[in-house]
Image (cartoon, rainbow, N blue to C red):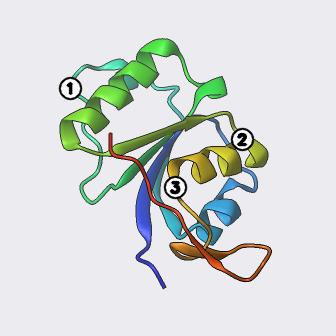
Amino acid sequence: MSEVVSAVVVGADRLGNIPDLLKGHNIAIRQHISGRDPSHQKKTLQLPSGTQLLILLTDFLGHNVMKTFRAAAQRSGIRVLACRRSVCSMKQALDQCGYCEACPVQKSGNGQPVRFVSRPG
């Protein structure tokens, strides 16, 4: 089984079914930030140590907040995933980024393993 990815989710007051979807992709939510606090627009924001993925829920964030969190992730070399706050949108974004469910090998319809490789940068 592959290693669990530690993520920070930014946006929305409630996450609904998103934590269950992320758990199925071996992603653990380290911290959830609503993004409503005016201090989230600071230029010197820092993400918690050990964060491997930043998930931005774009339909619940202002432009400046997204810009601040993206800059913090870029400074730390953390991957950023941006999508709307819906399970369908999150699943589509995870699949496009190369995060498959449970492990790096999924079974295709004919029983052959399919490898998903994430593209650099």
2 and 3 marks in contact (CB < 8 Å):
no
Answer with the quarter of the image where residue 24 lies.
Answer: bottom right
Answer with the quarter of the image where residue 121 lies.
Answer: top left
Could you say which disc has been placed on residue 44 in the image?
A: 1
Does 22 appear above or below 86?
A: below
Which one is closest to the eye, mark 2 or mark 3? 3
- Where is mark 3, residue-wise? 98
Which amino acid, mark 3?
Gly
- Where is mark 2, residue-wise? 89
Which amino acid, mark 1?
Thr
Q: Position of residue 99 (x, y in %)?
A: 53, 59
Label 2 crowd (10 A; few <14 / some 14-19 / many >=20) = some
Which amino acid, mark 2?
Ser
Q: Position of residue 5 (x, y in %)?
A: 42, 65
Helix, strand or loop at mark 3: loop
The residue sitting at 77% across, 46% down in the picture is: 88
Residue at the extreme top: 63
1 and 2 marks in contact (CB < 8 Å):
no
C-alpha distance separating marks 1 and 2: 30 Å
Q: Nearer the viewer, residue 32 or 93?
A: 93
C-alpha distance separating marks 2 and 3: 14 Å
Which one is closest to the eye, mark 1 or mark 2? 2
Image position of 114 (left or right of 49): right
Helix, strand or loop at mark 2: helix
Mark closest to the chain's N terminus, 1 or 2: 1
